[in-house]
């Protein structure tokens, strides 16, 4: 085992050391998610999922599965 110095990046999370505190930043990870789902120009929303969201009967199961995949990816974002 060897000392590699202060932690700066781990699992796409940036660690910033300031005034004896450690701040975590996931901006890079969230940008990758937006690019993956072609949502670079989307509008922000305070929660990852609207409550009581119902998909219409003409919505394909592929579309609803993609929505669940996107929301599931956001659950791991640290606030």
Image (cartoon, helix red, strand yellow):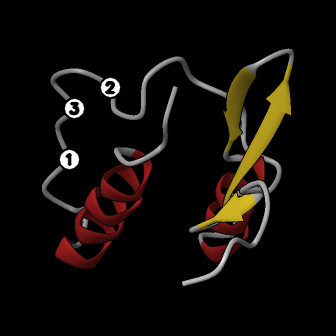
Looking at the image, do the residues carrying marks 3 and 2 touch, with CB atoms under 8 Å apart? Answer: yes
Spatial CA distance of label 1 from label 2 is 12 Å
Q: Residue at x 48, y 43 (%)?
A: 77
Q: Is residue 35 left or right of residue 41?
A: left
Query: On the image, numbered disc 1 is attached to which residue?
Result: 55
Badge 2 local density, few (<14 within 10 Å), some, or many (20+)?
few
Which mark, by number, is residue 12?
none
Looking at the image, do the residues carrying marks 1 and 2 touch, with CB atoms under 8 Å apart? Answer: no
Q: Nearer the viewer, mark 1 or mark 2?
A: 2
Which mark, by number, is residue 50?
2
Query: On the image, numbered disc 3 is attached to which residue?
Result: 53
Residue 45 placement (x, y as % from top left): 57, 23
Label 1 or label 2, whichever comes before in sequence order: 2
Q: Nearer the viewer, mark 1 or mark 3?
A: 3
Q: Residue at x 52, y 25 (%)?
A: 79
Badge 1 local density, few (<14 within 10 Å), some, or many (20+)?
few
Residue 27 placement (x, y as % from top left): 75, 47
Spatial CA distance of label 3 from label 2 is 6 Å
Label 2: element kind: loop
Looking at the image, do the residues carrying marks 1 and 3 touch, with CB atoms under 8 Å apart? Answer: yes
Q: Closer to the camera, 6 or 59? A: 6
Label 3: element kind: loop
Spatial CA distance of label 1 from label 3 is 7 Å
Q: Residue at x 63, y 75 (%)?
A: 36
Q: Residue at x 32, y 69 (%)?
A: 63
Image quadrant where one finds the N terminus: bottom right
Residue 15 placement (x, y as % from top left): 73, 45
Asked if 27 appears above or below 64 in the picture, the reply is above
């Amino acid at each position: 085992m060897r000392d590699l110095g202060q932690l700066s990046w781990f699992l796409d999370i940036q660690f910033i050391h300031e005034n004896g505190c450690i701040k975590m930043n996931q901006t890079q990870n969230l940008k990758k998610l937006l690019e993956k789902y072609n949502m670079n120009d989307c509008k922000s929303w305070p929660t990852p999922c609207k409550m009581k969201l119902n998909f219409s009967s003409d919505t394909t199961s592929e579309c609803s599965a993609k929505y669940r995949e996107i929301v599931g990816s956001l659950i791991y974002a640290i606030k």
